[in-house]
């Protein structure tokens, strides 16, 4: 699995449609300060479902939409499309190429599509969760974040590793199942009380 391309349209400083093609191996984005390098990384987090405006270096989610410059009016929507090569089947979907897109309008929430079909945020998260590109986005290490990881407690560091290994999803499911079990046990006890009252 590797990221094939990323298209930004109306996202942060990328007012016009801009596509970056990634070849297998290392890709290096170079440019002067303020030219939009970090915005590319923000777009990657955003299309994969990032929900925190702060993680995208903004005050509110709307800040991802192109806000205009002296020569260009603000836009009403932001769109990012990520294409992933899935020939190795790393993503649990029957396609050799997977396209995930996220669109946001100034007056509304986000819309997601997987291979051109409308999807929910949960579908995107589930699709990516086994690949190590999880909800917490630990695969994207921002400026200054290395220190945070190095100084994290062993529990937090274990969380990073579990997410990257795809274990976190199962731990969450286990917690959910245990909660259901607990609720069922309460119901069974209540039933037993009722039965003994009727007798
Ligand atoms: P550095 O090397 O200093 O880290 P960078 O290349 O990573 O810089 P970014 O932080 O990606 O640069 O881009 C910052 C630029 O993006 C700023 O000029 C900022 O005005 C612009 N920008 C951010 N959000 C928007 C937006 N919503 N609309 C228009 N421009 C935006």
Image (spheres, rainbow, N blue to C red):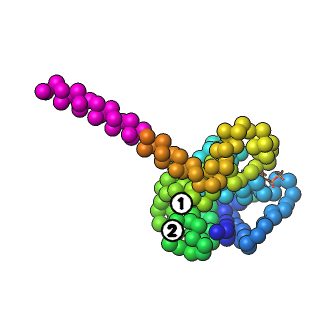
Let me know if residue 74 appears in the view: no
Q: Are marks 1 and 2 in contact (CB under 8 Å)?
A: yes
First of labels 1, 2 by sequence position: 2
Structural crowding at the residue carrying mark 1, measured as other residues with C-alpha within 10 Å and reported as few (<14), some (14–19) or many (≥20) = some
Taking the magenta stretch, the answer to whether it contains residue 54 is: no
Which numbered tag is attached to residue 127? 1
Label 2 sits on a secondary structure element that is loop
Outermost left residue? 199
Quarter the N terminus occupies: bottom right
Q: Nearer the viewer, residue 71 or 25?
A: 25
Measuring from the top left, give residue 197's x and y in whole percent.
16, 24
Q: Nearer the viewer, residue 119 or 79?
A: 119
In this view, 19 is above or below 133: below
Let me know if residue 145 appears in the view: yes
Q: Is residue 108 left or right of residue 139?
A: left
In this view, 54 is above or below 169: above
* Dominant SS type (magenta): helix
Taking the magenta stretch, the answer to whether it contains residue 194 is: yes
Measuring from the top left, give residue 156's x and y in whole percent.
67, 40
Query: Badge 2 is on which residue?
Result: 93
Outermost top residue? 197
Measuring from the top left, give residue 9's x and y in whole percent.
65, 62
What is the quadrant of residue 99 in the picture?
bottom right
Q: Nearer the viewer, residue 116 or 97?
A: 97
Q: Is residue 34 left or right of residue 176?
A: right
Which span is picked out in magenta? 179-199
Which numbered tag is attached to residue 145? none
Label 1 sits on a secondary structure element that is helix
Determine the residue positioned at 77% across, 57% down: 36
């Amino acid at each position: 699995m590797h990221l094939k391309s990323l298209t930004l349209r109306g996202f942060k400083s990328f007012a016009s449609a801009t596509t970056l093609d990634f070849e297998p191996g290392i890709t290096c984005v170079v440019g002067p300060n303020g030219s939009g390098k970090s915005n590319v990384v923000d777009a990657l987090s955003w299309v994969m479902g990032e929900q925190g405006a702060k993680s995208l270096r903004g005050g509110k989610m709307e800040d991802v939409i192109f806000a205009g410059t002296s020569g260009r009016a603000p836009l009403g929507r932001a769109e990012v499309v990520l294409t992933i090569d899935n020939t190795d089947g790393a993503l649990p979907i029957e396609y050799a190429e997977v396209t995930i897109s996220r669109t946001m309008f100034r007056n509304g929430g986000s819309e997601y599509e997987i291979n051109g079909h409308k999807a929910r945020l949960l579908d995107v998260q589930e699709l990516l969760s086994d690949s190590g590109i999880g909800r917490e986005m630990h695969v994207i290490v921002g400026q200054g974040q290395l220190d945070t990881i190095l100084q994290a407690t062993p529990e937090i560091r274990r969380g990073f590793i579990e997410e990257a290994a795809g274990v976190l999803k199962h731990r969450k499911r286990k917690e959910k199942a245990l909660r259901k079990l607990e609720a069922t046990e309460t119901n069974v006890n209540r039933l037993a009380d009722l039965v003994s009252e009727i007798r």
